[in-house]
Image: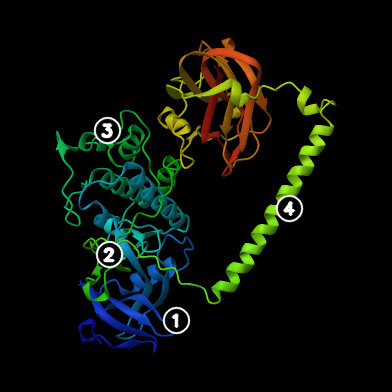
Amino acid sequence: MSSSAIEPGMKLAERFRLEDRVHESGGATLWKAIDEVLARPVAVHTFDPDFPRLNEVVTAARAASRLTDPRLTQVFDATEDDGRSYVVSEWVSGETLTDMITSGPLDPERAAALVAEAAEALAHAHEADQAHLCLTPDHLVWTAGSTVKLLGVGVDAVLADVTSDDPARADAEGLGRLLYAGLTGHWPGDEQEGGLPAAPMDDGHFCTPRQVTAGVPGYLDTITCRAMLPESRRGLEPLTTPDEVAEALASVPRPTPMPMPMPMPAAQQPLPVAASHSEGLDAMAPQRPAPPLAPPQHHHPRPAGGGMVNKVAMTMVVLLVMVAVGLGAWTLGRSIGNAGTPTAEQTAKPTATVAAATREVKPASASGFDPLGTDGAERPELALYAVDGKPSTDWHSESYNSEDFGRLKDGVGLMLTLDQSMSVKQVSVDFGSGSGGAAEVRVGDSQSLKDMTAIGKSAEASGKKVFSAESPEKGRHVLIWFTKMPNYQGKFRGTVIDVKVLATK
């Protein structure tokens, strides 16, 4: 039975009822179908009997079905027989990256967060020897359930007859192109993709994201170049695997739900647009804004038996007032009787508190600090995230193989610079959820480690810690200095989510 002979309403395996033909190309047809056993929509691929890569597609689909990362679409079934071969997979509803950037680039942090999720999912797939090789903005989806989904792992490459001698590097470059598209709204490829404008070029090379769009952070521009723009790396090491891309984007705050438009009445809702060649996708079409709602009218129904309830309530109020008056009179009498005996409250002197004697000081600048490094810096592009007041962002160091930096250095840290020299009394640091490590806070007018004075130390560089000086220490620079690194995902890395500096008035 050829694919063209298969019509809507046909049922496969006495379970999957085909409903809508979504896409057809080269002897393969994608359908939206209903799994009548579990009462859910699914995507079904059917094939012409002479489809040239039928065995490879079914084999790839079965391999993809063993992947467990929830950000990868799940394959439910793959069957190859005489005349009726098919692949059944998850049907995804949501917005593709193409949809999200049609009217312009995303907020840089959001673009990076979406690609970071995709990179981690794809790294998981590569651990199981599964690659994508065909990454486009249509494959990256922000679902209706506010999660990231990456479509087409393992299957799309076979459908498109795409191969690579270095699949890891091909997918790292593909992730770089997705990040470029999210940051600029342009597609850096040989052909225009999904109606997106082509990335501008300079002297035969794609312009970097910062050359195309103002406001792209330098570190995201660098990551994009390292992944897919070799001519712009300026001596930096390339990112050659999805795992390396994921590590480079590890500090990016993860995506949060975007505001969704109010639903239309059913009669006005547009039909979903199909946008995937391998796994099913409902792309949410732009919706007209809902008319403004009239202010709600509050109606207060009178309770039944209101007269009796009001009488009981009034009686309770009178009783409570009488009790309060009695207690007040008793307290007053006791105070008069004890007037000649000084109490502890009367004789105690007020105790000065930190809050009364200090004020919070906002750092003028921040930078990663590694005095033994080649450039003296440690992830400086992330430093301002430690003082932006957002719990979703952080500064963190490079990852090390041991807590003592391989005995190559005494420590690394985060250097804060104040507007002027001040008397620092207290520094609060949120080190995040790691474990182990050790840190101290130093203050001084010089950024030389030997000229700075330690105002406090902690044998655990995790969670929230407060470092207080016995007497205020004067200085313009405040250093959070890691002498041992906390554990982080099998390696060792220092993190600072937030810092607050208190100085005496």
Name the kind of residue labelled 4 in the image: Val
Vertical position of residue 174 compared to residue 212: above or below = below
Please report whichever mark, 3 or 1, sits nearer to the chain's N-terminal start.
1
Badge 2 density bin: few <14, some 14–19, many ≥20, Cα 10 Å: some
Is 356 positioned to the left or the right of 415 in the image?
right
Asked if the residue at tag 1 contacts the one at tag 4, i.e. Cβ–Cβ closer than 8 Å, the answer is no
Q: Residues within 10 Å of mark 1 (few under 14, many from 20)?
A: few
What residue is pinned by disc 3?
A: 232
Residue 36 is situated, as x and y percent measured from the top left of the image, at 40, 85
Question: What is the CA distance from the residue labelled 3 to the residue labelled 2?
Answer: 36 Å
Q: Nearer the viewer, residue 474 or 372?
A: 474
Asked if residue 136 shows in the view, the reply is: no
Most foreground residue, 133 or 293: 293
Q: Quadrant of the C terminus?
A: top right
SS at mark 4 in the image: helix
Pair 2/4: label in front: 4
CA gap, disc 4 and disc 1: 64 Å
Residue 419 lies in what quarter of the image?
top left
Query: Tag 4: Cα neighbours inside 10 Å, few (<14), some, or many (≥20)?
Result: few
Identified by mark 2, the residue type is: Met
Give the distance between the C-alpha atoms of the residues marked 1 and 2, in whole angstroms. 24 Å
The mark that comes first in sequence, 3 or 4, is: 3
Q: Earlier in the sequence, mark 1 or mark 2?
A: 1
Labelled pair 1, 2 in contact (Cβ < 8 Å): no
At x 28%, y 62%, the residue is 293
Q: Which is more toward the observer, 210 or 433?
A: 433
Q: Quadrant of residue 201?
A: top left
Cα distance between the residues tagged 3 and 4: 80 Å
Vertically, is 84 above or below 275? below
Q: Which residue is mark 4?
A: 323
> Which numbered disc covers residue 284?
2
